[in-house]
Amino acid sequence: MRVRICNSDPEEARQLAEALAPVHQVEVQTVCERTKPDLSGVDALVLDTNFTENHGFELLMDGSAGTRVPVLLVAPPDDPQLAIEARRLGVFNYVVKTPKLAGILRLAVDETANLFADASEQRKLLQTLRLRVADLEAKVREAQADPATATAAAPDAAAPARRRKLFETLLERVGKGELQVPNMPEVPAKLRELLRTDPDIVEVAKLLRQDASLCARVIGVANSAYYGSFKTSHTIEQAVSTLGLNATWRHVELAANRNLYTLGDNRFRALLKPLWVHAAACAELCRAIALETRLVEPDVAFTMGLLHDIGHLFLIQLVAEADAEGGIEAPPGEQAMARFLAEYHGAFGARILELWKLPPEYATVARRHEQPTADGDGAAAARVVHLADLMSARIGFGDRDKAPLEAELDALAASLALPQEKLRDMERDVAKLLGEI
């Protein structure tokens, strides 16, 4: 097995290489030259948290190395949080750096490789089963479409009442603390407050270092094609300098909220990725619309766009959790789940934003963004988010039907005095940003 050791200390790297050399082909890397390493031919990665300023986490972002090769993290004994963050980013195993590390490293590498192989086999089995299920479902649809075998299906009159009961049960259990929703990410809010004091880059970097994965993400964005810096950023200070303070805050907000989009239940996991991309697109479009219309403060519009569909996310997570515990019956199938989410994500999202103690306008946007009113508290913001919602669908980052989209979009844009050419410019820029960062 070919093992790459990533360790910035040449002497430590040499000792670890000697421990593995009798049974493995070993290569050593002491300098991180780029955040997306070439792992062709590598069978396992031993990643020390000393490898980069951000603990080597840059290597795990954006389709992490952990999905391509097994990664064994070498973590310091005084910071267990690093190991937890690394596991979330795709690391399969970790060991604590002690004087006896070289003696156990071979066993740890072999165990990590075995864990990775087992997980890969499970993924292949699940994919095979999914294909088999899809084939069976297609055959069932064909049989139902055959006039000789088709039978009229009576509408389920009790379904609306069941959806309402499920919604009320989830709200009640959240209120009692039986089901937990994540706390609002702290670092973006702290950074926003810090930016009001006109800080320097050193102060901003100090705050961002509280979360290593956010640092890694910001550095990755600064090095992306979209920002086109001629000088690679290796530190968080360099990344902030490249992006600027306001753009840094927006990408911290995006990254911190992206971390909320996790789910252990395979049945609904596929729903999360399009939700996240839609939220990110709406956030950027809301800011662009706000800059043109001045109806809402641009940074506020950005956050409103990011959170307007948060009810979708937390309903999926809580349904999966409660169903696994046996406390509720999840909607049967994707269509039933989609109907439930469509009916109740706005009200549920509004309740979560109230629990997060955000200003009332945020809850109003969550509740009304699909059918905004002409006036009232939060009406202007809801119209901005609704327009962003439609625009994101037009460029492929939404799930709305395209047929009624253009007429509705044209009318709303006209009411905000925004010409179509301006909207197209916004859409192109956001599509480019999301495609390159």
Image: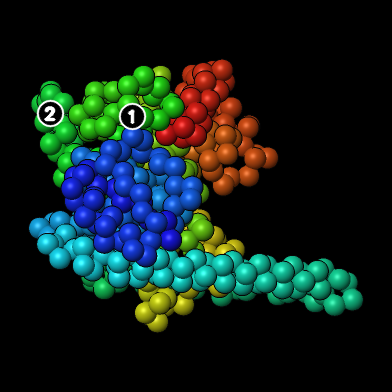
Q: Position of residue 97 (x, y in %)?
A: 16, 59
For the C terminus, the image quarter is: top left
Q: Which mark is residue 202?
A: 2
Question: Is label 1 in a helix, a strand or a loop?
Answer: helix
Q: Position of residue 364 (x, y in %)?
A: 34, 44
Kind of residue at disc 1: Ala
Q: Residue at x 61, y 37 (%)?
A: 405
Q: Is residue 436 above or below residue 272?
A: above
Q: Residue at x 19, y 51 (%)?
A: 12
For disc 2, the neighbor class at 10 Å (few under 14, some 14 to 19, many from 20) is: few
**Dots 2, 1 in contact, CB < 8 A:** no
Question: Is label 2 in a helix, a strand or a loop?
Answer: helix
Q: Quadrant of residue 37?
A: top left
Q: Residue at x 52, y 36 (%)?
A: 392
Q: Quadrant of residue 284?
A: top left
Q: Which residue is mark 1?
A: 222
